[in-house]
Image (cartoon, rainbow, N blue to C red):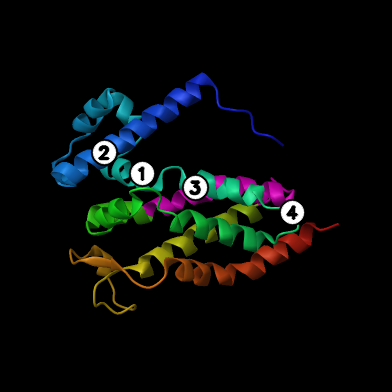
Amino acid sequence: MTTPPPGLRERKKQATREALRAAALRLAMEHGPDRVRVEDIAEAAGVSPRTYNNYFASREQAIVSAVTADREARIAAAVAARPEEVRLAEAVTEAVVEQYTDAGEGGHEALLFITTRPALRHAFLDSTAGIEPPLTAVIAERLGDTGAPTARVLAASVAAAVRIALEGWLRPAGEDAGAAGGLDAGRLVVPVGSLSDRLRAALAPLAPSFDAAERRVQP
């Protein structure tokens, strides 16, 4: 089924969201995230603080959103675009890996900025929870059973797996994988190993559950 193009209202909302994201990241990188107020971001984007609050719950969320920008929706769209003969587990894995490893223009610098600051780093990790709602919808459609909890359980598991992969990837320099509280520390955090490999490894245990769900709905 072809999704109709967004109307004028939705396009305006998307433009406002994009302006707030861009302003938040630019001001944070120029002045430091601790010196940026919601009022500053709103003014730079040409909206009121009240309007800002309709889009983001915190300045950290707005800053991080400049990097994550609708990633959750893109993951779901990528899964939906895969041919039906492709295993659902494979479709989900490839969509997640593609969207999390494509930083886009200027994305690497912004990601480094975020991962070296604890508050932004935690907001970045928390953003993985946003994967669940759109992915639940597309999995339910693929399974043909929108009333069952299976799709939600699978989508929530994907979100948890992605967070675990990111936590392992964003580890304070010199810290062992089993160390506790590392991401709460103010030490330098550097990416460890291949993010693609970590995502695939974290998602691999979910494949049997995806396969079982697909077998249950096959005629």
Cβ atoms at labels 2 and 3 below 8 Å apart: no
Q: Decide: few, some or many residues near mark 2? Use Cα within 10 Å; few <14, some 14-19, many ≥20.
A: many
For disc 2, the marked residue is: 24
Specify the label residue 72 is tagged with. 3
Q: Is residue 51 left or right of residue 44?
A: right
Residue 65 is labelled as 1
> Alpha carbon of mark 4 to alpha carbon of mark 1: how far?
31 Å
Q: Residue furthest top?
A: 8
Residue bounds of the magenta highlight: 126-148
Amino acid at circle 1: Ser
Q: Is residue 91 left or right of residue 121?
A: right
SS category of the residue bearing label 4: loop
The residues bearing labels 4 and 2 have C-alpha atoms spaced at a distance of 40 Å
Task: Identify residue for label 4.
Answer: 84
Does 38 sit above or below residue 74? above
Residue 22 appears at what percent x and percent y? 31, 37
Is residue 211 in the magenta section? no
In percent of the image, x 26 and y 26: which residue is there? 49
- Element at badge 3? helix
Pinpoint residue 46: horizontal percent, then vertical percent: 27, 23
